[in-house]
Every structure is written in structure tokens, then in C-alpha cells.
Image (cartoon, rainbow, N blue to C red):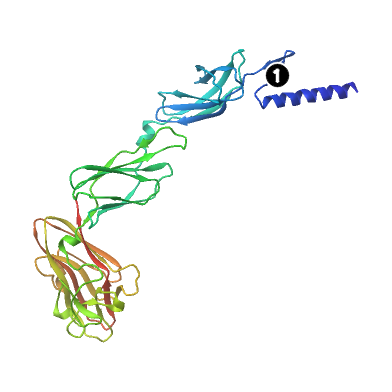
Amino acid sequence: MKKLMLSILSLAAVLAWAGCSKIDDYREFAAGRMHKYAGKVDSLKLFPGNGRVVLSWLLIADPNVNKVTIKFNGTDSVTVPVTRSQHQDSITYEFSPLPEATHNYTVITTNTFGERSVPVYVSGKSYGENYTKALLNRPLEDAWLAENGNATLKWGAREETCLGVKISWTKNNGSKAERYLAEATPEIVLEDYKPGTPFTYRTLFKPEPLAVDTFYAAPVSMLLKREVVTHKYLKNFRRPFAIGEWDGERWGTPAYWNVTASAKTRGGLYGGFDNLGGAATFGFEKWEGETAINNGKASQTVTLPAGTYEVVLNLGEGEWYLGTRGNDVRYLAAATGNALPDYNAMGNALVYKNFSGLTRSGIRFTVDGTSPVTIGFVMNWVSWEAQFFRAQEIILNHIPK
């Protein structure tokens, strides 16, 4: 019976100690006496930063706590005095400057009775030059100036720690403007962009969700990859194409385009405009056994200032009435002067490309001084098989240097 009573008393003592520990009223038996602890800090957090860390905690359990001791580097410590209020106290303490490394801290409270709390531990990193040097800007996939005078920047996937991108540019009146691209947004428009001027961007990062500082990748300054100048030089370059002459139903000759007689195989009068399904496309066609298009051409001559240019043929995005068929020669070409070379003398062109089988094709060329340049198409469709192409648009870009 005595052993049973001792066991019950021992169990009661253990349960009483466990219950008190939940409210930071710890008691331990040492040399036959009890020891009472001060209430420990609650919700201890470490916020990493640039050459610093910030510790934050709450004082809840013990209203008599009057100082907090923080130990670090094994033997160093700092004491933070506490002035209690009637409300829950939230306290922060910053360690700065710090080397770029992981840091460990032990936090202990002391109350007005000289009693100390059990320690609470926290660790975390401070960041600095090495981290910043390793940051890479969000990839920029494309940047172009549209016909409306606004620039569009298209971005690749962002890293998880990327907050966004800051972009600055020059407006047409010479003033500076700035925009912020948030998180995963894929595109941003820069209004009233001055042609030929660079834009600057840099990416913002937060290495951890609790970080108190924002880090920046090195700024990048660059020109737009292209400036759309189609509307400045070409005419009638996009669906619905305007008609010069036509049969009143499907076939015609596009306005402002010079179409050679050998390319006018629709009724012997028309070529270059195809209104299939009311689509009003720029196009040519020759079906099995029909009249061949021998060295047929369609072009416009424009005067371009010195610079590098790109001509892009867009044959659509899968629309049933657009596209191309057949393997006979069909060149997208540009040449100095007022005419395109013949199909068998394309070496005299500035540049040319056979776009058979392609839905989008481009050529690039450079002119050294202001001069006339002829842009367009050269076809030689003489095989039995069916041949055609119908286009959505023809685009002329200026490529800044």
C-alpha cells in the first residue's frame, strides 16, 4: 500500500509539472528544491535581410519579464530592456551589419524576480553581395514598337523568388516614364515610346518569404528588338486587303501592288487578291492543269532610310482560308531599285527566301543610305500539282542598332 501511495504521489508530481510547463511555470527538482522559470518568448521569428537579420517575438506568459538576452556566436550576447504595457508586447531587434552567412540565436527572458526562462532558439541567413551577384534578370523574349506608338515587352517564365520587374523608358516628348511588371505577368505595354531610344529594366527578388529587404539584379539597358514601320512605307498590307480591280466575286488585283501579267492567271485579268469565303486575302492560286505562273511577281517599291529592316510574311494561324500549298518556287524577296529580279536570278536581290511549307517567314536586309527598295514575291509555278498561298499580312520592321 505504501508503494502504491508513493507511485500515485510521484505521478501527480509529474502531471503537475507538465501542466505548469504549458504556461511557462516550469518547476524542476534539484537538490531537493523547486526552481521557477520566467515566461519564455513566444512566436520567435527571424527575418533575413541585406547584411542584417531582424528578430521578432511576443511576450505573453509572464507580465514580470523586464529584459531579454540574445546569445549569438557562441559567447556573445546582447540584452534588450523591456517596458511592459497593458497589451500583448511585440518586440523586434536588428543585428547589423552581418556577414553573408547563417546565424544562430538563443533568446532568454529574465523577470523582476531574477528568474530566467528556458531558452528559445532560432536561426536564419543574412544575404549580401554574393547573393546579389548571382541574380539573373527575368528573361526577355521579345520587345517591339507597334504601329500605335506603344512598345510591348514579352517576358519568359519568372523564378519563384522574383517579385517583378521595374522598367523605364523615354516618351516622345523626351520625358522619362517608369512601369512595374508584377510577378508572373507575361507582357507589359510602354505607352508613347520614342523610337530609337533604349529602355532599362531590372528584376526585383525576395530570397525568402520573410525577408525584410528587396534585392535587385544588375540593370540592363537595350534597344527594342524591332520597330514596326509597315504603316510608314507599305500600303495595303493586312487583311482585309483593298481591291484594285476584281471580278466582283472572288478574284482581283490588290490595290497599290504591282502585279506582273504572268501572275494574273485568274480569267487572264486578275491575280494577288483572293476573296475565298469573304476573307479578302493577299494570294495566288494554280490548280492541277491550270495556266502556269511563269516568273510571276507582286511588289511595292518604297524609299527607306539607311538601316536594317525585316520583312515578315504571316500566312495565318491555322485559318482554313489561309496558308500555303505546293513546292514550286515562291520567294519572299527584297531588292534595291524599282523591281524584283527574275526567279532564276535571285542572287541579284538583297535577300530572298522560299516560304514553301511555312506559315510564317521573314527576311532581313540592310541599306547603307536612303534608296528605293522593292519588296514582294516572285513565283514560278509550272508543275502539274496544285499551288497556292493566301496571306494574313505583310509586315515591315526596322531593326534598331
**Residue 334 occupies which quadrant of the picture?**
bottom left
**Residue 389 occupies which quadrant of the picture?**
bottom left
Q: Is residue 265 above or below residue 364?
A: below
**Residue 289 occupies which quadrant of the picture?**
bottom left
Closer to the camera in the image, 69 or 280 = 280
Image coordinates for residue 17, horizontal then vertical, percent: 72, 23
Image coordinates for residue 180, horizontal then vertical, percent: 33, 44
User: Could you tell me if residue 343 is visible in this image?
Assistant: no
Query: In the displayed image of the protein, which residue is found farthest to the front?
Result: 86
Q: Which residue is mark 1?
A: 28
Query: In the displayed image of the protein, which residue is found farthest to the right?
Result: 1
Image coordinates for residue 157, horizontal then vertical, percent: 39, 50
At label 1, counting other C-alpha atoms closer than 10 Å, the crowd grade (few under 14, some 14-19, many 20 or more) is few
User: Could you tell me if residue 182 is visible in this image?
Assistant: yes
Closer to the camera in the image, 191 or 156 = 191
For the N terminus, the quadrant is top right
Closer to the camera in the image, 196 or 333 = 196
Image coordinates for residue 116, horizontal then vertical, percent: 61, 17
Q: Is residue 237 left or right of residue 205?
A: left
Q: Is residue 225 left or right of residue 67?
A: left
Q: Is residue 105 above or below residue 256?
A: above
Question: Which residue shows up at 25% across the image and 67% down it?
Answer: 393
Q: Residue flagged by tag 1: what amino acid is it?
A: Glu
Q: SS for tag 1?
A: strand
Q: Is residue 267 above or below residue 336?
A: below
Closer to the camera in the image, 234 or 383 = 234
Question: Which residue shows up at 54% across the image and 21% down it?
Answer: 85
Total numbered badges shown on the rendered structure? 1
